[in-house]
Image (tube, grey):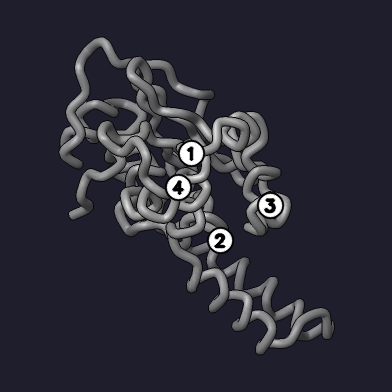
Amino acid sequence: MPHDHPHGPTIDAKRLAQYQCMAVAVQELLTEKGILTDEQIQATIKEMEARGPALGARMVARAWVDSDYKRRLLSDGSAAAEELGIPVDGTRLIVVENNETTHNLIVCTLCSCYPRNVLGLPPDWYKKTAYRSRAVKEPRVVLAEFGTFLPNSVTVRVHDSTADMRYLVLPARPAGTEGWTEQKLKELVSRDSMIGVRTANQAES
């Protein structure tokens, strides 16, 4: 089960609290220096929190019906997102494709880096130490716990996100959806399928 690259140590609660304090300090400095107001910061936070997986699902559905867009998406995820009017704010978005021989799984072993621009806020389980460590050590076991059972012939690839690089899974298009509209296909794409813990059209718990 290939792993994308060496990963950093798991951050414990104490270290995470230190980072949270640093974030608050930076926010206070920005307002103190007059660079941003509290209202601007809160508006940006609300905008980010309002984003959900529908944006990512739109990209996936477009790739399912448009082979040229799919090629651009796999070549440069950030540019392909912006092509649909989805801002990525300078983040490098890498899109990896699930198919009959390969299944991709996304994790951030260092903290909880996540493509919020296209998926919204990460689920609680994505941020937990158990997922961050076990997804690398025993990905098939983790997948099975989400109800995703893969034959041994399928290679599982785990991709480790970083502070400036995010991953998004392009799930395999479900069989029997030939001729479906992009809008109808979009409804099959879940957040979990774009993380890789489930397949498209597989219900989330």
Residue 19's tag is: 2
Q: Are marks 2 and 1 in contact (CB under 8 Å)?
A: no
Q: Earlier in the sequence, mark 2 or mark 1?
A: 2
Per the model, the C-alpha gap separating discs 2 and 1 is 42 Å
Q: Amino acid at mark 4?
A: Ile
2 or 1: mark nearer the eye: 1
- Horizontal and vertical percent for residue 51? 50, 67
Q: Amino acid at mark 1?
A: Val
Q: Are marks 2 and 4 in contact (CB under 8 Å)?
A: yes
Q: Earlier in the sequence, mark 1 or mark 4?
A: 4
Q: Earlier in the sequence, mark 2 or mark 4?
A: 4
Using residue 87 as the reference point, say whether residue 193 is left or right of it. Answer: left
Residue in front for this viewpoint, 42 or 13:
42
- Horizontal and vertical percent for residue 161? 53, 39
Say which element carries label 1. Answer: helix
Q: Earlier in the sequence, mark 1 or mark 3?
A: 1
- Horizontal and vertical percent for residue 5? 53, 24
Per the model, the C-alpha gap separating discs 2 and 3 is 30 Å
Is residue 190 something that shows in the picture?
yes
Say which element carries label 2. Answer: helix
- The residue identified by callout 3 is 82
